[in-house]
Image (cartoon, coloured by chain):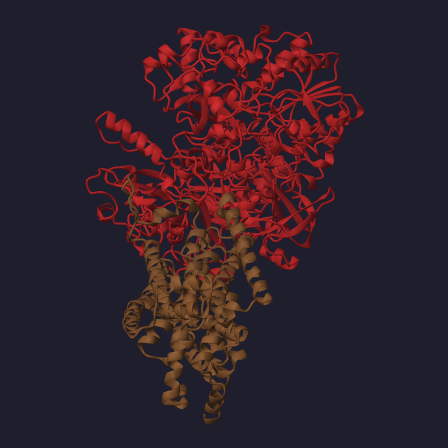
Chain colours: A brown, B red
Amino acid sequence: MATLAREVESTYPTLADANEDISRPILVPAWRYAFVLSLAIGGVLLGAAAWIYQIVVGIGVAGINHPVGWGIYITLFVFWVGIAHSGTLISAILYLFRSGWRTTINRAAEAMTIFAVMTAGLFPLIHLGRVWYFYWLMPYPSQRMIWPDFRSPLVLDVFAVGTYFTISLIFWYTGLIPDLASLRDKFRGWRSRLYGMLSLGWTGSVREWMHYRRAYLYMAAIATPLVLSVHSVVSWDFALSIVPGWHSTIFAPYFVAGAIFSGVAMVITLMVGLRYAFGLEAYVTEHHFENMAKLLLLTSLIVGYAYAVEYFLAYYSADPIEQESFLWRARGEYRGPFWIMVFCNVVVPATLWFRKIRRGIPALFAISVFVNIGMFYERFVIISGSLAHEYLPSGWGLYTPSAVEIAIMIGSFSWFYMWFLIFAKTLPTLSIAEVKEHLEHERSHGHAAGAER
Amino acid sequence: MSLLSRPEGMREERSEEARESGAGPDGCGCGGNSAAGSGCPSSSPEAGLGMTSRRDFLKVVGVTGAGAAVACGPPDYGDKLIPLLVQEDERVPGVSDVYATAVVVGPEPLGLHAHLREGRVIKLEGNPDAPNSGRLSALAQSSLQDLYDPDRVPGPRKRRDGGDAGGDQAGGNQADGDGAAAAGFVEAGWEEGIAALGGATQGGGVVLLTGASPTARDRFFEEWAAATGAEHLRWEPLEYEAARAANEIAFGRREVPSYEIERADAVACFGADFLGTWLSPVQLATRFAEARDVDHGRHAKLTFVGPRLSVTGLKADEWVSCGSGAEGAVALAVAAVVAERRGGAGELNGLLSRYSPETVAAEIGVSADAIRTLGEELAAASAPIAIPPGFEGQGEGATQAHLAVAILNQVLGAIGERVRFGSAPRSGPIASISTMAGLIDRMRSGAVRTLLVADANPAFTLPKALGFRDALAQVANSASLSPHLDETAAGCSWILPSNHALESWGEVDFGGGPTGVAQPLMPPVFDTRQTEDILIQIAAAGGVELGGGADFATWLKDAARRRRAEEGAAEDFEEWWRSELASGGLIGRERETEQPTLDPALAGYSFSEPAMPEGTALVVYPTVQFYDGRGANRSWMQELQDPVTRAMWNSWVELSPQTAEELGVSNGDLVEVSSEAGSVTAPAFVYRGIRPDTVAIPLGQGHTAYGRNARGRGVNPLDLLPGTADRLSGALAFAGTGVTLRATGERGRLVILQGSDSDHGREITELISVEEALAAERGHEVDLGELVQAAYDSDPNSPYRWGMTVDLNACTGCAACVTACYAENNVPTVGEKVSAQRREMSWIKIDRYFVDTEDGGFQTVQQPMMCQQCGDAPCEPVCPVYATYHTAEGLNAQVYNRCVGTRYCANNCPYKVRRFNWFEYEFPYPLNLQLNPDVTVRQKGVMEKCTFCVQRVNRAKNRAKAEGRLVGDEEFRTACQQTCPAGAIKFGNLKDADSEVSRQSRNPRGYHVLDELYTRPGVTYLADVTHAALPAADHGGHGDPGDHADAAAGGEHEAGDPV
């Protein structure tokens, strides 16, 4: 521990360094960045072309069929909504708990949340048979006096995801205001004017800080229940149906835990990349990663427990159809995805019991990628796997994604990374204000205390 | 009269007065068909072709005026549009005109009620007064697609100079229009063609090759041939010559008797698929359902003897598996047992003594116990009946097999009682294989100078080994009168396309006296003429006057006039003729005929040894959807899931699980089947219901022409037949060919959408024993009162809660309901590729489940599955936009134009009956003319499903409301109910406790599928009933799911990727 503290000390940046280091990437031109961004934009164009093709020809160009009416699209919807969760968790809940280690990752995590929700929100549209009537899902005043059916989980979804997006955006923006002001001060010319406008005339006065801190605290308090509500509502898309494998009361906590699990994994994936690309090793330390790894381990245990409970409930229900469905999940045609899911989400994260692995960045990166893959498969197994093997044996059938679905999937990842890359190049990826505050705090209270927190 | 010829004698929906005033008195001279026959020049042969849009068609429909009508052929859709200023008395937009007519579909004469809207036929229903009692088969329902087939030959065509004769390239690009052009034909005028063929019919060497049917057309062909000096031959691949020959030997009557199964209490079927394709399947299914009316205390046991379980076989309570060709020997052995039990069989004792079960069993490898049991059961029954072998067993000894069954029927005392002569439809004799071979020789040598082919497609339906196709090319003048560009037409030098049966005049013999009159329902869709009229014109061009130079309609009417005069009828003929057309003909006047007795000389008859091939025997059989191949271009038939295999859009090779294991193949693996005559390669279908020493390939696919859906699809098993014939009758031998099998190691595409063959103990299907059904002590699961009163089911103030019952005991799986639904509800077909993606659209499908029995065999339950119209429907609350909602009458309505396509409703439907429009599906002209204007054509991205024919519900309600009353019981029927040959479906108001459907819902056999979900379905199923021993472990006849999975392993095909 002492060695570590010395290491930390030797690389400990000053407040000025922090300003410089964090905002540096905005100015530094990098061909690598341009290359990666153009890749992402290319991917988005591919996905858009696939979607247009799907709209023109019909949703039949996707591989979904009868009985598997929901496939990759809804899987990705749940996947991205899940990813979106850790952002709020890290910013809001950890803020309320005063977990200092969140400061270096919350900005990126929140940005990730916004972009993930933006990605997730596309899929309910993409999967519609007649997307040109998507607005019928909204309760808008219509002369025909037809409203959406508020009993439908899909309408609840619209509200849940919409609310989450709005709150997350405001929360993120609120956190950005002092940093935008820093950038305004740092730059000259159009950048200064732009950031000035965005910073809403922030001057950094004590009065402003006082109000700001209060507002931020309240925003965090408002955002906190959303962490639980959004994915609960998303889980009701399934739990409120009667499909064996969907109809289960544990779905809400199970999905929330899964969402945090996948979200944390995605934060790790992104932060490792960001840290490497922008040289932020001094700010995002192994200590931060270890804390995230602990969160990953915890949620992995919850998710693993949920898997076991699902089987127990199937057994305990004494419902032969439910039982058969769950046995089929592990033994049937979709056993591949099922066992991938178990391996990635339960077996691989179990290595995090070892501190070395928790603090080993490459290992952690690999594990986070495994978890992302595993969580994708989890949603696939739940959504498509359950539909493939329902009540009526004559109606059993499998689903294989089509090229269009794969293209749209690539497009969705590209869309997400495109926004993230733009974010990384235009806004401070770490919260300058909070980092500074934290650095100051560390200095005055000693390193060891900080490291322990 | 209008431009469109109007069929006479409209029925229903029209008052008597209106009919009196509206219909023109002459039923013959008016209108398009006969005008075409009069040789009126058609100004533009293109006029009726594929360019007409629905809009144009409606414009033409709007045209009235006698001036336009009398003189011209129908396709002159040009510049004579006159708006419909004065509404015709008879034609009300939005109301169906119903006309009676009669057609022969496959083997069976059927009386029809055709529903016309705005001048076009949109739906066929059975004529309730005809022997088919208002019911139709899938094939008959789909004749509409034959009528509106976009690939029909649109007008007369002649072979392009130097154009290749031969069908292989026929219809190269038919989807783009004129297939005939691609096949090497050019447009020609009717006069040119008729003159050319008129010349060709002079000077001998003329052969008229036709199909055979119990119709006036058959008689006309005879007459025509006699007048012109031509030779007339009839060729049908699926005919009953062997049965006729056997009955001539046994009873001196060269005919097929009728089998009155409804009077039997035990049925032994020696192979005929009488519920599917044999003789008169619609009628026989009705009769069979009556014999098994378990609610009235009867349930005739059906024992099936044969190598493979057909539609009939799957319905059987017991299967005595015997090799194809051995059916006759089994029948004799059974007869011997019966004789023994019943104290002798008179003069037949000597003959039968040679066929003890043990002797026969040793010879053909069938268990003696099975034979003895069957014999004893039949002997113990009070009214047993035996049904002869069908096409599956038609080998070289076919006549003798029929004879053996005739002897068994004699021993059973069924002859004259339940097997009655003199009441089956009659047609002329069919050419034997040797006659056909002789014809082919003469064609090759040039002795046949002119060949006219009508209603037959020998280039497809004769075994390739006989070489008809090559010989056709040697004939100097050949003409096809087929409406389709079939294989024979593709090889002819002329195509003079004839009208479809629904566009034609005719007369159909229903057997035993009743005769149905066929009338054209609408002007020809294309530039075609009535077959007989073409022949009359050809004869006239050749200098022979037939029937006084008039057309066939006059010929027919004159014949009727003469008959009336002979009978000394006092009634005015015209009046009578009109009533005849209105009713559909002389229907229901069955007369008793004297019944023959067995020829005593039969006692000394010597049967040959059963001829069974070495190694693996090939069985070739017709299917309900294609019959002899004529259904192959109808997309409804291609997309119909075969009742036995559930496969669609292809051919397949049925293999037993053992054979499949030996070859190492599973469903969809390509298997090459080779015989001495050739080889075909088709995907395997592993089937529990076939003997290990037998493989079966269905007939009807493997077309090289015929249209976009038929061409190049599947294989023709006739290519494997060496062209041998039944020794005594000369009928084509479908059985008895030895084949070798080879797994090619490749995958084929066999689309099978049924996920599992077992219901895994989920009580989806219930199968109970006869004892239990008759005792009716079963715990009744359906509380109708609760069903109707439950809060969500229907509005308490509504007088209606629509409901349905489906009797699984009656259902044979013939799929007539499925096709009727396609026709009524504008259900699109999606094609093979999209079907393979599990996206077919049928609103009602039939699930086929196997249930293991105690003795290691299995029973089959065919279960029609459609929207259950749940009282508390899982689909309803999940729709975000109220596109699916509950009506006051308990229906789950689906609002197509509100649907945004989330598909959540389909996901949440436990019955998996919702269908999604994954693409925009098209109805290429003129198939769009068949669309029902009362039903929306759905857009892509929209969910749809069975509506309980809500358009019919509303029509009936509107009528009732106008008359100030409630809709009566059975006042209308849903399309599936209306056509069901077995009468398995009942529909009506569950709130009326006395309605038929309410009574049926209270049946002790009633149950709801998945009722533990508390969806409260509006559809009540009545459990299937079997004589087979069911596993005692489970009340409902369901074993442990694991057992099912293992036992069904052979037949089990996980749906997966069928490609």
- Depicted B378 relative to depicted B502: above or below: below
- Which image quadrant is residue A237 in? bottom left
B1033 lies left or right of A25: left
B292 lies left or right of B163: left
Q: Where does the image place residue B22, in percent across and percent down from the top left?
A: 38, 12
Q: Say which of A66 and A87 sits in front.
A: A87
Instruction: Name the residue rendered at 57%, 12% in the picture.
Output: B37
Q: Which residue in the rendered view is the most extreme toward the left?
A: B797
Q: Say which of A27 and B938 sits in front.
A: A27
Q: Which residue in the rendered view is the most extreme toward the right?
A: B445
Q: Where does the image place residue B772, in percent across and percent down from the top left?
A: 34, 51
- Depicted B570 relative to depicted B204: above or below: above
Q: Where does the image place residue B214, in percent across and percent down from the top left?
A: 54, 23
Instruction: Name the residue rendered at 53%, 59% in the picture.
Output: A410
Q: What is the total number of numbered labels drawn onto the structure image?
A: 0
- Which image quadrant is residue B400 in? top right
The quarter of the image holding the N terminus of chain B is top left
Is residue B1051 among the parts visible in the rendering? no
Q: Where does the image place residue B277, in percent across and percent down from the top left?
A: 53, 36
Q: Which residue in the rendered view is the most extreme toward the bottom?
A: A2
